[in-house]
């Protein structure tokens, strides 16, 4: 993964398991610039990057990705949103789930190299 998006502010963190992070997504985050002009959304690659980076920080998983499995994007995330990111260690890496309120926005599993 080569993209590096600025980290969103963490409003609340529970170390779990699972790890649960409440994230604020201010409109001035660099990842919203140009994706898409006039109708900005949170890019999927940024969601993966944050899951990998927060997984490394909170779960000690590797930053090197082998594969991404079962990736699903279910809901568009717009600037100003508050998301909950849940992370759990798996035998080969981690699983992640982003929610806005009680609605799943994206989920997947990351197998670390």
Image: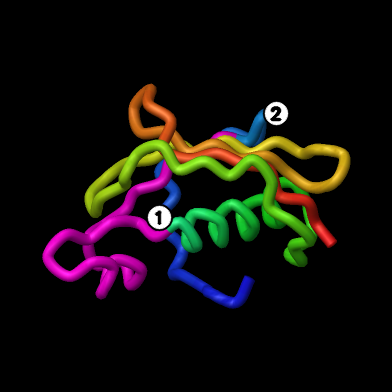
Left or right placement of residue 111 versus residue 32 in this view: right
Q: Which residue is mark 1?
A: 9
Left or right placement of residue 14 versus residue 100 in this view: right
Q: Which residue is mark 2?
A: 17
> SS for tag 1?
loop
Answer above or below: position of 33 versus 65.
Answer: below
The quarter of the image holding the C terminus is: bottom right
In-front residue for pair 10/92: 92
Q: Is residue 40 visible?
A: yes
Picture coordinates of residue 8, whole percent (x, y): 41, 58
Q: Main secondary structure of the magenta part?
A: loop
Instruction: Count neighbours of disc 1 (C-alpha within 10 A) and say few if under 14, some if 14 to 19, many if 20 or more.
Output: some
- Residue at image coords 74%, 62%: 65
59 falls in the magenta region: no
Query: Total of numbered circles in the picture?
Result: 2
Q: Is residue 21 visible?
A: no
- Residue at image coords 40%, 55%: 9
- Part of the protein shown in magenta: 20-43
Picture coordinates of residue 67, whole percent (x, y): 74, 56
The colour scheme is rainbow
Answer above or below: position of 107 versus 6.
Answer: above
Label 1–label 2 contact, CB within 8 A = no
- Residue at image coords 77%, 39%: 89
Answer above or below: position of 49 versus 105.
Answer: below
Instruction: Count neighbours of disc 2 (C-alpha within 10 A) and say few if under 14, some if 14 to 19, many if 20 or more.
Output: few
> SS for tag 2?
loop
26 falls in the magenta region: yes
Q: CA distance from mark 1 to mark 2?
A: 21 Å
Circle nearer the N terminus (1, 2) = 1
- Residue at image coords 40%, 44%: 11
Picture coordinates of residue 63, whole percent (x, y): 73, 64
* Quarter occupied by residue 100: top left
């Amino acid at each position: 993964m080569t993209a590096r998006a600025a980290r969103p502010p963490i409003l609340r963190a529970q170390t779990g398991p699972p790890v649960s992070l409440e994230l604020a997504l201010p409109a001035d985050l660099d990842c919203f610039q140009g994706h898409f002009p006039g109708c900005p959304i949170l890019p999927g690659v940024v969601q993966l990057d944050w899951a990998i980076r927060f997984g490394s920080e909170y779960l000690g998983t590797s930053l090197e990705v082998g594969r991404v499995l079962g990736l699903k994007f279910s809901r568009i995330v717009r600037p100003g949103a508050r998301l909950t990111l849940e992370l759990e260690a798996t035998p080969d890496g981690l699983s992640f789930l982003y929610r806005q309120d009680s609605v799943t926005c994206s989920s997947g599993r990351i197998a670390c190299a």
